[in-house]
Image (tube, rainbow, N blue to C red):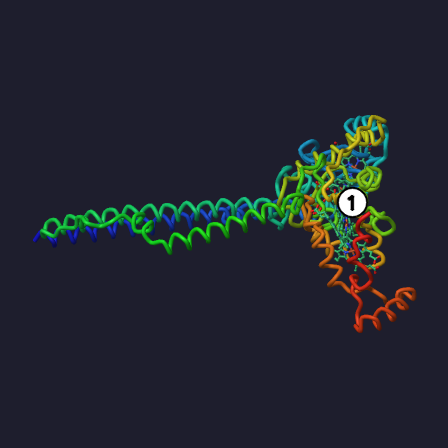
């Protein structure tokens, strides 16, 4: 009788736990589905008056020369301008602002005076529909992610949240399992007790450690193992002294190679121009930055791609740091004369007794920057990719063939050395790339 009773209570617990974990996982699914539904609603809502996506295109091609959304340029900032004037006025203004000013419209005259009597280009070719599109674009809230591209910033956070949810669910399921085991254990003990079975431990056992200490062979084997692994780790530790692979310091300006060299495809040598012709590669002066940043004063993510790492506000603030350093006043569009140097933290640094020459590798040997520096165009933050040890240099010299095509001087040496070594291809090592004096002063 008693057995049956216990059995049912046990299966009831099991059933309860199952139901609990099931309902929990359902709940987490429902939460995952929710943001998707939200996004759908948003898309239909913004399609109401004017298409902001088409508006953005028009804005960029016609208006961006003089206007920005959030900052004054030649013309005033345009975000929210649709709420500032009524529609009819805006149509007239954009179609031909000079006419409106001439007609004596008070708002127009005042606006014109406020902006130093600068004339805005007339756009008679724009239909009212086009203007609605542009105004829909300028009415978008600031932080909102644009158009049909939901933007990875949000996506990343969402998937982060759902990852947390899944983790939480797993932890809960595990907890439930533990509770179940404890319950099962105690139930079984009760059953055993009820049936008069003795489950307590047997006596006369010697402890594990005692047994271990008596077995000399085991002790010997463990000691050897411990010594070997100790030596291994000590060696590893000593070998990494002075090796800064992966060194990734925080720079005074957050400069992203991913955005510059990756998304915007700027050639490495545009900035590191001396790599081709000299020993060092150098860091570009701030004047080089200003070639572009006189005009790029805020971060818009214009390439519409994966800027997962930071927000637009963060990037724009970093560009402002550049302006503070060169003394550029972006609202007045002129230099103030107040400069302060940017102290970039040096990342790659060979010891003084080593001679390394960039032009030798980049121009003569034709080695890509990425071979040594890694996929720099994907680095949000610059880091040291290679170990820069002697072994690293020498290995590459042993493995890399010398580029002889189109180099008569090399052709001759190559033919002679190829005969001498009896090989088809010459490696840098064959050319003397492992001689101490080549790398050490
Ligand atoms: C050649 C430069 C230039 C271009 C191009 C230009 N604007 Fe303007 N815009 C101005 C200036 C300057 C003003 C300030 C008023 C003035 O001085 O005429 C202005 C003012 C405005 C205003 C009124 C802003 C306010 O704060 O009340 C609106 C709206 C406007 N522009 C819309 C547009 C649109 C839309 C386009 C593109 C289709 C455009 N502008 C293209 C120079 C320009
Ligand atoms: C728009 C200019 C620009 C472009 C383009 C650019 N860099 Fe840089 N690079 C910099 C600046 C500024 C720094 C210093 C700040 C830093 O370390 O992030 C730097 C730092 C580096 C460093 C580390 C220097 C050190 O201190 O040891 C390496 C290596 C490097 N760049 C390689 C590359 C490669 C390879 C490319 C092409 C894929 C490239 N850079 C493209 C501007 C640029
Ligand atoms: C060849 C043009 C060009 C040069 C040169 C250039 N930039 Fe940029 N920079 C850009 C573009 C394009 C963007 C992205 C703008 C956007 O997407 O809205 C950008 C974005 C930035 C940003 C924000 C994103 C980030 O990387 O943190 C900073 C800060 C910045 N640049 C600093 C610099 C500095 C410092 C230099 C000089 C070492 C420099 N830039 C040189 C074109 C350039
Ligand atoms: C054969 C490997 C190799 C190649 C290829 C290479 N570098 Fe380097 N780079 C190095 C080493 C090693 C250092 C450290 C030099 C030092 O500390 O004297 C370095 C340092 C740098 C620095 C720091 C400043 C300096 O000059 O010391 C920059 C920037 C840099 N490299 C950019 C580039 C760019 C851009 C390219 C491609 C045009 C490139 N490197 C190609 C190995 C390489
Ligand atoms: C990615 C492969 C690679 C790496 C890594 C590399 N080198 Fe080289 N290096 C070459 C090649 C290829 C040549 C042959 C260039 C030529 O055609 O003369 C060369 C040539 C040289 C030479 C001239 C040798 C001669 O015979 O005149 C020196 C010096 C040198 N490297 C130093 C270094 C140092 C120091 C390092 C490490 C910090 C290093 N290299 C890392 C590929 C590499
Ligand atoms: C291809 C270039 C290259 C050649 C050839 C080369 N070395 Fe080096 N050597 C290096 C570099 C790079 C370092 C710095 C390693 C570091 O900082 O971890 C170095 C470091 C050393 C050190 C210091 C070790 C340490 O950990 O600080 C000694 C000693 C040394 N080399 C001796 C030699 C001798 C002897 C030869 C000739 C048999 C030789 N090197 C050939 C590139 C080279």
Relative placement, left or right, of 368 versus 176 is: right
Q: Around disc 1, counting alpha carbons within 10 Å, would you say few (fewer than 14), some (14 to 19), or many (20 or more)?
A: few
Q: Is residue 406 above or below residue 17?
A: below
Callout 1 secondary element: loop
Coordinates of residue 81 in the picture (x, y in percent):
70, 34
Coordinates of residue 336 in the picture (x, y in percent):
84, 27
Q: Label 1: which residue?
A: 353
Please state which of residues 147 and 165 is positioned toward the viewer in this rendering. 165
Q: Is residue 373 above or below residue 63?
A: below
Q: Is residue 278 visible?
A: yes
The structure residue drawn at horizontal position 25% and vertical position 52%, both measured from the top left corner, is 15
Coordinates of residue 19 in the picture (x, y in percent):
29, 51
Please state which of residues 300 and 92 is positioned toward the viewer in this rendering. 300
Please state which of residues 44 and 404 is positioned toward the viewer in this rendering. 404
Please state which of residues 10 and 214 is positioned toward the viewer in this rendering. 214
The residue most toward the right is 408
Residue 324 image-quadrant placement:
top right
Residue 382 image-quadrant placement:
top right
Q: Is residue 76 visible?
A: no
Q: Quadrant of ligand 1?
A: top right
Relative placement, left or right, of 238 versus 176 is: right
The structure residue drawn at horizontal position 84% and vertical position 73%, both measured from the top left corner, is 419
Q: Is residue 404 above or below residue 143?
A: below
Coordinates of residue 51 in the picture (x, y in percent):
66, 47
The residue most toward the left is 1
Relative placement, left or right, of 77 versus 228 is: right
The structure residue drawn at horizontal position 15% and vertical position 48%, both measured from the top left corner, is 190
Mark 1: is the Cβ under 8 angstroms from ligand 6?
Answer: yes
Relative placement, left or right, of 230 versus 266 is: left
Q: How many marks?
A: 1
């Amino acid at each position: 009788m008693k057995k049956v009773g216990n059995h049912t209570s046990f299966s009831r617990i099991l059933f309860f736990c199952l139901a609990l974990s099931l309902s929990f996982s359902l709940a987490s699914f429902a939460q995952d589905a929710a943001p998707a539904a939200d996004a759908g609603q948003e898309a239909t809502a913004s399609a109401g008056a004017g298409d902001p996506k088409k508006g953005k295109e028009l804005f960029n091609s016609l208006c961006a020369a003089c206007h920005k959304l959030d900052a004054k340029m030649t013309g005033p900032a345009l975000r929210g301008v649709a709420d500032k004037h009524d529609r009819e006025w805006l149509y007239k203004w954009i179609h031909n602002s000079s006419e409106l000013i001439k007609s004596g419209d008070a708002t127009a005259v005042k606006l014109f005076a406020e902006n130093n009597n600068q004339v805005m280009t007339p756009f008679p070719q724009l239909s009212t529909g086009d203007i609605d599109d542009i105004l829909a674009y300028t009415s978008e809230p600031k932080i909102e992610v644009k158009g049909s591209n939901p933007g990875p910033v949000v996506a990343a956070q969402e998937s982060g949240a759902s990852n947390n949810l899944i983790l939480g669910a797993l932890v809960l399921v595990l907890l439930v399992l533990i509770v179940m085991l404890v319950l099962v254990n105690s139930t079984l003990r009760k059953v055993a007790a009820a049936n008069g079975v003795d489950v307590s431990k047997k006596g006369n056992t010697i402890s594990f450690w005692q047994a271990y200490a008596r077995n000399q062979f085991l002790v010997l084997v463990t000691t050897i193992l411990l010594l070997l692994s100790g030596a291994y780790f000590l060696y590893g530790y000593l070998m990494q002294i002075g090796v800064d692979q992966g060194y990734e310091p925080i720079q005074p300006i957050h400069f992203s190679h991913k955005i510059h060299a990756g998304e915007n495809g700027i050639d490495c040598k545009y900035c590191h121009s001396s790599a081709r012709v000299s020993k060092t590669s150098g860091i570009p002066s701030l004047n080089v930055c200003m070639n572009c940043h006189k005009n790029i004063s805020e971060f818009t993510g214009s390439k519409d791609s994966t800027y997962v790492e930071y927000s637009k506000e963060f990037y724009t603030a970093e560009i402002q740091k550049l302006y503070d350093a060169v003394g550029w006043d972006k609202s007045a569009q002129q230099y103030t004369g107040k400069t302060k140097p940017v102290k970039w933290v040096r990342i790659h640094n060979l010891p003084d007794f080593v001679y390394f020459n960039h032009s030798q590798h980049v121009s003569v040997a034709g080695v890509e920057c990425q071979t040594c520096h890694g996929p720099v165009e994907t680095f949000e933050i610059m880091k040291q990719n290679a170990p820069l040890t002697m072994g690293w240099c020498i290995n590459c010299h042993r493995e890399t063939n010398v580029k002889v095509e189109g180099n008569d001087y090399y052709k001759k040496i190559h033919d002679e050395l190829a005969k001498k070594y009896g090989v088809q291809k010459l490696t840098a090592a064959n050319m003397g790339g492992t001689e101490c004096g080549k790398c050490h002063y």
